[in-house]
Amino acid sequence: MRLESKVCCLRVLSAVCISLIWLIGAAILGFSLWFLLDVWIKEYVQAAPELLEYRIYVYLFIAGGSFILVFGVIGMIGAVKPNVVCLVVFLVFSVLLFLLLVVSVVLGFFYRVEVENTIQKSQLMTTIVRTQYGKVDAITSALDYMQVELHCCGGVSFEDYKGSDWVTVIDNTDAGVEANSKNTAPLSCCSSYWYIRASLTPDSKYCKMYKDSVLSSQRNEPTEEIYKTGCGEAIVDLLRDQFFIVCAVGISIIAVVLLTIVFLSLLIHYLRREPPMSMTDDVVYEMARCQEKSPYPTRGQGGPYANLYNN
């Protein structure tokens, strides 16, 4: 393959890889900004001081996504023009990004248990359920959605709703539930949520916790409809299920960055390489072939083309 063809091919491959990295950076930046600005997540973190230390990782992701966008533009300019300086700058950035991604995947693998324990053992979900559910519309909607989608109820269990501010609210607004409020959970805690909601009646606005009254001296047995798993445990289970998917995405990004490093290295090498010069013997042969008197010129000392052999 001629040098020009190699350079053209490498420029196209480099541009494709740089575009993928730029899109990855845009996705990281967008997701991080959403994570930082989302009302539910902000309330969730503020309810648990132990999660504040993880907030710094969001800022790191925002900074990382911004750097990828900026350097991606530089790399694209270098691949399109082409410009060796821009390519070298993006190559150095790609190497640093590759090392950072590898370290991040390794640390994420070893520290995932710590994150899971922080979520599962903290009282943040219980605090939100007892103090903010039913009072803050955004949190109420988010928690209802979580309970329906993750098939969970409360922070640790459905009993978190006992004595919560939400119970006080419904005691004051719904006289029909006042006498049995300690046996009441939100409708989103019921496995038959969609069926009950479709035919909503005054008697089916809430989810019953126990089969018998909580005032009974006998031990109460939970109803079949209510979810027994707490949302803290459900979130941890979700993280465990999605962990390998996240790892696969991370490894795919690492592979793209590694290919970019290889293509950029080859492209820079060929761009800095001087174009090959025709050999002297080739020039002599072409001149000899066109002569009328002799098929080949005289080699060695003398002759009209002897100077071609002098180095």
Image: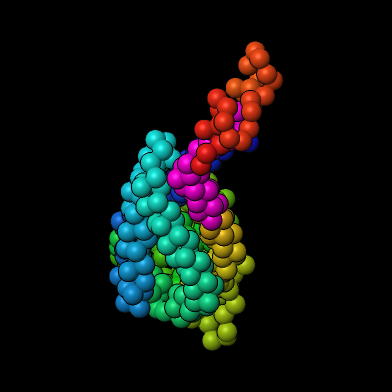
Residue 136 at x, y = what percent? 30, 60
304 vs 100, nearest the viewer: 304
Quadrant of the rendered image containing residue 128: bottom left
Chief secondary structure of the magenta portion: helix
Outermost residue, front side: 302
Residue at (49, 48) in percent of width and height: 269
Q: Is residue 73 visible?
A: yes
Q: Is residue 140 visible?
A: no
Is 287 part of what is drawn in magenta?
no
Residue 288 at x, y = what percent? 63, 22
Q: What segment is highlighted magenta in the picture?
A: 258-284
170 vs 311, nearest the viewer: 311
Residue 53 at x, y = what percent? 33, 75
176 vs 1, nearest the viewer: 1
Outermost residue, top side: 292
User: In the rendered view, does 176 fall on the left or right side of 43?
Assistant: right
- Rendered image coloring scheme: rainbow
Residue at (43, 53) in percent of width and height: 91
